[in-house]
Image (cartoon, rainbow, N blue to C red):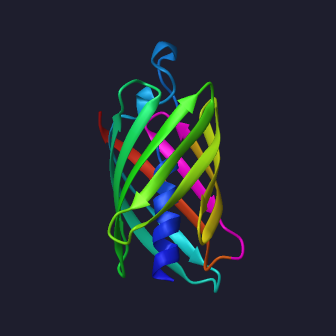
Amino acid sequence: MRKLAIVILTLLALVSVPVLAVADDGPLAALAGAWSGTGTIVMSSGAKERIRCSANHRLGSNSSELRLELICASDTYKFNLQSQIVNRDGSISGNWLETSRATGGAIIGRIAGNQIQVRAEGPTFNALLSVTTRGERQAISIQSPGSEMSDVTVTLTRKSR
């Protein structure tokens, strides 16, 4: 159960970034900076647990690449994520690795306006993720029917650029 929770939160981290930016810089340019927020994980049993997250996102060698570092914790666990994503004409692709547990996978999807929609896949986990950004806030939803962690929602606020 802990491993699945970590995978879900890791996938959440991949899309927990805003999508609005100056057109010349590409949609990932607005992602750089420090973010924090809280949310809820709903287990398949119906039990809920609060999570706290902080993130630091940096552009890669150009504005179409993003490197992400994220730490999330609840009362019962903590994880450390490193990931990279690339935007090519509105198509998102990338990978993620949860370093303390050596688990990872791939992510693919699209950016359209202020919304990211992706599918995350790993050896033991699949999920649909949606991120809607308005100004300095993000609403994030992860749905993974049939898994132990069936629903995750998080709201993040930018702390600094």
The image shows residue 84 at horizontal and vertical percentages of 43, 44
* Residue at point 35%, 68% (across, down): 79
* Residue at point 45%, 18% (across, down): 25
The image shows residue 41 at horizontal and vertical percentages of 53, 71
The image shows residue 80 at horizontal and vertical percentages of 33, 63
Pick the front one: 124 or 29: 124
Q: Main secondary structure of the magenta part?
A: strand
Whether residue 18 appears in this view of the structure is no
Q: Which residues are magenta?
A: 133-146
Q: Left or right? Give the position of 1 relative to 59.
A: right
Q: Residue furthest left?
A: 160
Q: Residue furthest bottom?
A: 45
Please state the total of marks drawn on the protein image: 0
Whether residue 132 appears in this view of the structure is yes
Pick the front one: 139 or 57: 57
Q: Quadrant of residue 53?
A: bottom left
Q: Left or right? Give the position of 93 relative to 99.
A: right
* Residue at point 59%, 38% (across, down): 92
Task: Verify whether residue 140 appears in magenta.
Answer: yes
The image shows residue 155 at horizontal and vertical percentages of 48, 53
Task: Verify whether residue 36 appears in magenta.
Answer: no
